Amino acid sequence: MKVVFESLETCRLMTKFTETILQIRDNNICTGCGTCAGVCSPEAIKMHIAGGLYVPEINEEKCVNCGLCVKSCPGYSVNFKDLNMRIFKRQPSDKALGHYLGCYIGHSNDFEIRYNSASGGIASQLLISALEKGIITGAVAVKMKSINPLETEAFIARTRKQVLDASKSKYCPVTLSEALRQILREDGKFAVVGLPCHIHGIRKAEQVCKPLKDRIVLHVGLMCSHAVSYIGTEFLLEKLGVNKKQVDSLSYRGNGWPGGLSVKMKNGSNANIPLLGSWHSYWAIFSSFFFTPIRCLMCPDEAAELADISLGDAWLPELRNDRVGKSVIVTRTKIAEDVLSYMSSTKAIAVMSVDSVKVKQTQGLNLKFKKDFFGARLATLRLFGTQTPKFDIQIDRTPSPIDFLRAFYPYLSIQLSSSKHVKSLLTYVPFPLFRLYFGVFKILALL
Ligand SMILES: Cc1cc2nc3c(=O)[nH]c(=O)nc-3n(C[C@H](O)[C@H](O)[C@H](O)COP(=O)(O)OP(=O)(O)OC[C@H]3O[C@@H](n4cnc5c(N)ncnc54)[C@H](O)[C@@H]3O)c2cc1C
Ligand code: SF4
Ligand code: SF4
Ligand code: SF4
């Protein structure tokens, strides 16, 4: 089955580029990555929050119809075959992980970094080591805003402290527009940390915007099952009885492995809830796809296949009792291998080579969901009249009836959590019931 995305293709040929961006936004195939706004030199596009997600907003008067926004947009199409050839000069040997040179498990040897990171602190350590060695002059990273701690802000980190201010996963929308603009304003060599869809946008933009290609020398991808809208965070706060206006700071991970949500209030009090591992952990809500952007159901990339290096959580049964954390690492290019061996030789990290099967084991259901049920997810979305993007991906698995059920489950969760009334009812559902609800998906996926 070949995925075709006819109406936007037609639109692209017939109308102004800004109209295409608006079509992408209005058809919910925008990932919110912010690449379009980042590459738009007259700054005709701005990202803003609507419905709990970042979406582009256009000032027609500033637009010079150059087309860079549409050509860079990963929302409506990603040509993986072409980009694999351009970046790696070959097609991936591994359908699930993409092209790779090496697979590893490791962690930062700096306890402060490791303990205060999402998993093993490899992302933060990598940026710090690359800055120290002069490979980069700055790194695009993401922190929670100091003025509004429920929103994220992408910025250029240039020091260890700034890198560490941005550590830990943000389970909420992140747009890179301002940081990309900054890269285009100054000379230098940069690393970018991002989710697979951020990397898709940047790789596409690099094909049409030479300064970006020259300046971004290291693409660090985070493995990604799906994202969560800002409404998801607000929902968690409501469940915890926290007034969002009283929040002073918030982090979704950290304080060891696997860490948890930690909210500091302006009056000095705290609210904490673990990510996993107890009936009262919060990930059961998000892993059940409540508050997931619908665009994530159309996404075929879990392992950040177009990055130089991909990082994830080492979810392995043998590491269940680890309380500090380890990351899983996939290198895809020479620069990634070089930085990794530099970090290892300077004892900044401890790392061991593993088989690709081990990496896949760490991702379990997430990888299965992204890859095996991709065709069923797209077919289900189209059945409900949802527009889907154009990927040059050959789907070789004909969806079975059970695949449709597997695809319907996340669709149902997204629809339920986007209804105001159901959302208010969900705030009364105790945490353990979300875990049971997620159990249904697990059974469906494993059948
Ligand atoms: C939405 C989301 C979904 C994820 N899904 C999976 C998954 O299914 N499987 C898996 O193994 N791992 C997943 N991860 C990645 C994982 O949580 C860790 O980020 C990864 O293991 C790196 O850990 P670390 O300790 O090396 O990172 P740290 O040293 O803590 O650094 C994290 C880096 O990531 C950047 N960052 C954090 N959040 C975002 C974001 N939302 N967008 C862009 N940049 C960000 C920070 O700026 C920082 O530079 C996901 C992360 C996110 C944000
Ligand atoms: S066509 Fe060019 S100028 Fe117009 S919004 Fe897109 S990038 Fe900006
Ligand atoms: S470039 Fe990113 S933010 Fe802009 S329209 Fe496309 S997907 Fe949305
Ligand atoms: S699932 Fe895909 S589209 Fe959604 S946040 Fe992750 S990489 Fe982006």
Image: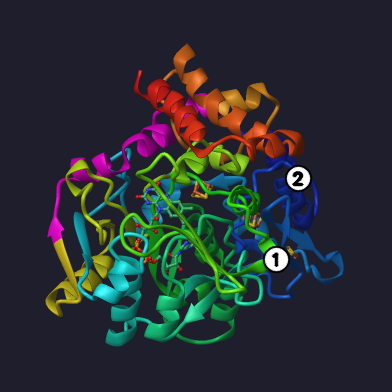
In terms of depth relative to the viewer, which is nearer, 184 or 110? 110
Category of crowding for the residue at label 1, using alpha-carbon neighbours closer than 10 angstroms: few (below 14), some (14–19), many (at least 20): few
Q: Is residue 157 left or right of residue 310?
A: right
First in residue order: circle 2 vs circle 1: 2
Q: Looking at this view, is 183 or 125 the one in front?
A: 125
Residue wearing tag 2? 26
Measuring from the top left, give residue 33's x and y in whole percent.
Answer: 59, 58
Hey, which quadrant is residue 308 in on the image?
A: bottom left
Q: Position of residue 293 (x, y in %)?
A: 61, 44
Is residue 391 in view from this perspective?
no
* Residue 249 percent location from the top left of the image: 56, 70
Q: Residue at x 45, y 26 (%)?
A: 441
Which residue extends farthest top? 401
Point out the stretch of residues depicted in magenta.
Answer: 352-377
The amino acid type, in three-letter code, at marker 1 is Lys
User: Can you say whether 217 is above or below 317 in the image?
Assistant: below
- Residue 245's tag is 1
| Amino acid type at image mark 2 | Asp
Looking at the image, which residue is at 54% across and 79% down?
Answer: 183
